[in-house]
Image (cartoon, grey):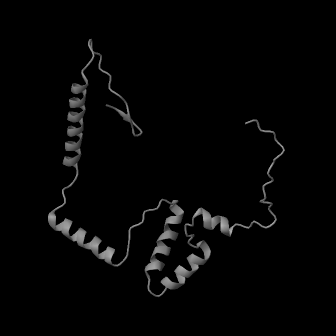
Amino acid sequence: MESTEGTEQALIIPFRRPVKPVYIRRLVRFINAVREETLERNLPKMRSAQKRSLSAYRHRLKRQGIIRVEVQVRKDDAVLLRGIAKALTDPTREAETRALLRERFGVVDAIGLKALLAAAPLEGIDLTCDRDFDRDVIV
């Protein structure tokens, strides 16, 4: 199967009779197994000591309240974001940096529809509904 830019093209094999679905499923399973085996052979194996140290490092970060965040930005902005991240981890500048960022970008809390309507400026808007009783209704 050839793939072009992430999309796979179907391989068409002409048969005189229709192929039973069970054989198609077996073929697909076989192809997937071969693909996985090929991928596993090409990836370097991580030793158990490496796994333990990586796990310990991740637990240590979790205890400290640090999480990993991945963002996609322009190349020019990468340096700026790294500087912000350093300022947030620096004990001498973290409070000032947080205050500045919250003042400028403020964290908006998610509120419900009821609270949103209660906070809406409704002065000058006529919310009364005139009932029309002039219609004749045949029951």
Give the residue at the far top of this rendering: 16
Residue 21 coordinates in the image, percent (x, y): 26, 25
Q: Residue at x 82, y 65 (%)?
A: 124
Compared with 25, 108 (above or below) is: below
Left or right: 112, with 134 as reference point: left
Residue 42 coordinates in the image, percent (x, y): 22, 48
Question: Of 30 and 17, which appears nearest the observer?
Answer: 17
Left or right: 9, with 125 as reference point: left
Residue 20 coordinates in the image, percent (x, y): 24, 21
- Where is the N terminus found, in terms of image quarters? top left
Give the residue at the far front of this rendering: 139
Compared with 53, 131 (above or below) is: above
Compared with 20, 95 (above or below) is: below
Compared with 49, 63 (above or below) is: below
Q: Residue at x 47, y 71 (%)?
A: 82
Question: Of 43 and 9, which appears nearest the observer?
Answer: 9
The quarter of the displayed image where residue 34 is located? top left
- Where is the C terminus found, in terms of image quarters? top right
